[in-house]
Amino acid sequence: MTKSPDNLLPLTPAVFHILLALADGELHGYAIMQDVAWQTNDALQLGPGTLYGCLKRMLAAGLVVESNKRPEPSEDDERRRYYRATPLGQRTVRAEAERLAGAVTAARSKRLFDVKAEGKA
Amino acid sequence: MTKWISRIYSMFLYAYPREFRLEYGREMELMFRDRCRELERRNDRWKMLSFFAQSTADWITTIFRERSAPQRGFAAEWAVSILIYLFATTTLVQAYVIPTGSMEGNLRVGDHLLVDRAVYADPGAFGRHILPYRDVKRGDIIVFTAPADPRETLVKRVIGLPGDRIRLENKQVIRNGHRLIEPYTQHVSPATDSYRDYFPAPPDAYVSTGGLDMLQHHVTNGEVIVPPGSLFAMGDNRDNSLDSRYWGFVPRQSVLGKPLIVYWSFDAPTADLEEWTARHVFDVMEHFFSRTRWERTLLVPKTQEAIEGEAR
């Protein structure tokens, strides 16, 4: 039996952006923080406590796993841990992205974006 | 600096629940250190300041979040958090404000500092692995209890260590027979003074009991010899500084620490900085933006070694 992502939605912004950061591959904590800052144009700066608090809960929910790969041991600090999204994590981030896309469509149908464009013009 | 701050950060992690800290503490420390390094490389003080503010907020919210799950020893764990906070703010760092201009040129009247109290306090064989520690060096800026008045805290620069021979000749320090070139000093008066600038000549101004004791018992061949367990310290603003020349040596035990960082510099008169009066509070509220010296925020006062010139 495969778990469904449905009862995990909606995700908190931190969890969503962490999963999004892990969509391209495995990363360590600091790289996750940098990727999230990049995705959100610096609007979301994850502190160490928030990030590892989220990762702890995401590990428990089976959204991510610790990776045993240690890329480039010469350059890298070997004590550093890498994280990877599980298949459930990948399905969940996709479902959440679809949910958000739906929300954007709804916003568009209510002409929220048009109003903004008119305001600027 | 990154090393020091990361160590402080690792102490703050003890406020988290034990399992959480053991599992992720090391990682959080690495992440914090990486971020510090990156900001240090970029040399962006504002980013640095906002990062510290964010980290504090992150620390507090994480304590609440990780503690919100009911668990054993709830009250005890909270007590630990509070103790860590008190320990960090009293034993490791202390706030201090520069009231007078004796270090002008490097530290200005109204500079609010954090003092690193851990650096000169030997934490013992075990603690040395956790806390940064080193002994006082020549050229260090030190914060210490005034030898003449224990209620007063002073900040000066270390010129002589135990065994050093010190004298002044026409405003220049001669240490162990070498004329010192001191790039950190400032002179405001072209006139010379027969005591201040030719120390240890017969005094022409008020010299405290400690100063007289130094002149009577520790002068050999026209030079002061710093006794064991003592330091000779002077202000960088040499012509306008009441220092070891006037009140004698600083006992090593009186040293509280060294300035770590200027967190706020506000242009205010000496009297206001010594005590918070209602008038000063209004003054700060009214002129906070215009009289804060923004360019001094997050300045790090540095140890500066004098260059030893020709032998005399």
Image: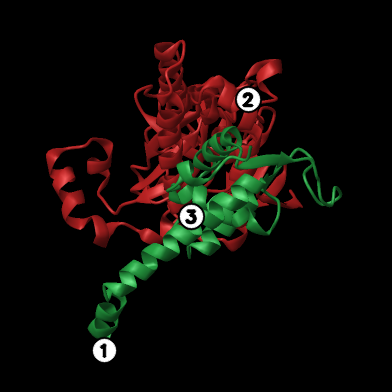
Chain colours: A green, B red
Camera-side residue of B209 and A12: A12
Same chain, marks 1 and 2? no
Q: Amino acid at mark 2?
A: Leu
Q: Which residue is mark 2?
A: B22
- Residue A55 in the image: state x and y as whole percent: 57, 39
Q: Chain of mark 1?
A: A
* Gap between marks 2 and 3 measured at Cα: 32 Å
- Disc 1 is placed on an element classified as loop
Q: Amino acid at mark 1?
A: Ala
Disc tally is 3
- Residue A63 in the image: state x and y as whole percent: 60, 42
> Is A95 displayed left or right of A63 in the figure?
left
* Gap between marks 3 and 1 measured at Cα: 33 Å
- Residue A38 in the image: state x and y as whole percent: 54, 63
Camera-side residue of A88 and A25: A88
Query: Can you tell which quarter of the image residue B292 is in?
Result: bottom left
Q: Which residue is mark 1?
A: A121
Is residue B202 visible in the rendered image? The answer is: no
Q: Amino acid at mark 3?
A: Glu
